[in-house]
Image (spheres, rainbow, N blue to C red):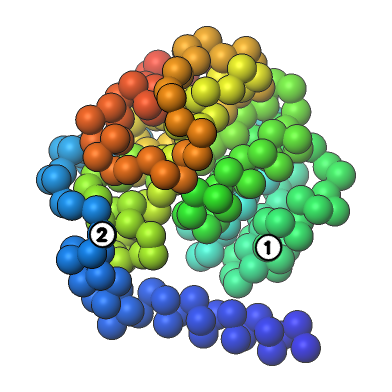
């Protein structure tokens, strides 16, 4: 029964990412969604990738345990060298075939390093971050992928491009307003969020109650302030 359900889910996932579906979604966003106000001009071509950032952090901090949420083709998971590795994905890759919600519901382990790259929707990313904080060792770090979209279509929901960030950035903005975590975004590999279980050193003050209502135009005008952007060299000093 589980295998049948998994196969159905995979087919649905492929349908959502098919060329025709993406074209239809793009048409919808272009004519009925938020106005396209241009590109920010982000360029990640000369920046370190997620593999280097995560592995260097594990080596430098001598971390022993690693959790990855959303493994897909194991592009990152297989590259990481750590004493204990757990990879969670409902479709493929990793070590556990389940949703992140199901995993965290029963998980009793804690981890030094957690990498979140699951469903790129604000509400799901927020849940994954909240649950990861509870499962994070005190001196550990949470990384979140795809935090810096370059234009309105990169972050549009539902997905309308093959290379897609989703509205992950909204979750980063929200956690930047909290006292009990210190949140940054590394200018590398589509934007890598960093959350530390420390007092917030640069708390964001923003007058909003529902962060899902944030617009790309808000991000476009304020992304440096919203995302607390650091270069990789600055990230090293944070640790």
What is the x, y in percent for residue 212?
Answer: 46, 45
Numbered label attached to residue 114: none
Of the 4 image quadrants, the one containing the C terminus is top right
Residue in view at x 67 percent, y 27 percent: 140
Residue in view at x 53 percent, y 64 percent: 72
Residue at the far left in the pictured view:
38
Against 105, residue 229 (above or below) is above
Instruction: Please give the residue where the numbered disc 2 appears in the rendered image.
Output: 33
Give the SS element for disc 1: loop
Against 97, residue 130 (above or below) is above
Q: Is residue 81 left or right of residue 186?
A: right
What is the x, y in percent for residue 189?
Answer: 35, 42
Could you say which is closer to the camera, residue 140 or residue 14?
Answer: 14
Instruction: Please give the residue where the numbered disc 1 appears in the rendered image.
Output: 99
Visible residue check, residue 79: no
Could you say which is closer to the camera, residue 224 or residue 42?
Answer: 224
* Figure disc tally: 2
Q: Quadrant of residue 186?
A: top left
What is the x, y in percent for residue 64?
Answer: 73, 34
Residue in view at x 25 percent, y 70 percent: 28
Of the 4 image quadrants, the one containing the N terminus is bottom right
Visible residue check, residue 2: yes
Q: Is residue 79 left or right of residue 215?
A: right
Residue in view at x 61 percent, y 85 percent: 7
Crowding at label 1, few (<14), some or many (≥20) Cα neighbours within 10 Å? some
Mark closer to the chain start, 2 or 1: 2
Against 13, residue 41 (above or below) is above
Crowding at label 2, few (<14), some or many (≥20) Cα neighbours within 10 Å? some
């Amino acid at each position: 029964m589980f295998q049948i359900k998994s196969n159905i889910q995979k087919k649905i996932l492929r349908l959502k990412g098919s060329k025709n579906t993406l074209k239809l979604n793009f048409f919808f966003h272009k004519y009925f969604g938020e106005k396209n106000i241009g590109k920010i001009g982000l360029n990640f071509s000369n920046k370190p990738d997620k593999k280097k950032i995560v592995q260097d952090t594990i080596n430098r901090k001598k971390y022993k345990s690693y959790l990855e949420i959303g493994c897909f083709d194991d592009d990152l998971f297989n590259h990481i060298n750590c004493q204990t590795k757990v990879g969670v994905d409902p479709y493929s890759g990793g070590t556990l075939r389940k949703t992140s919600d199901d995993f965290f519901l029963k998980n009793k382990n804690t981890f030094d390093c957690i990498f979140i790259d699951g469903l790129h929707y604000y509400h799901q990313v927020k849940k994954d971050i909240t649950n990861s904080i509870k499962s994070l060792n005190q001196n550990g770090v949470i990384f979140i992928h795809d935090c810096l979209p370059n234009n309105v279509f990169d972050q549009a929901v539902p997905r309308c491009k093959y290379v897609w960030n989703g509205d992950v950035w909204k979750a980063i903005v929200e956690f930047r307003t909290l006292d009990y975590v210190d949140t940054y975004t590394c200018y590398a590999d589509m934007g890598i969020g960093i959350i530390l279980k420390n007092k917030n050193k640069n708390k964001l003050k923003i007058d909003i109650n529902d962060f899902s209502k944030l617009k790309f135009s808000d991000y476009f005008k304020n992304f440096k302030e919203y995302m607390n952007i650091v270069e990789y060299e600055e990230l090293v000093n944070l640790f």
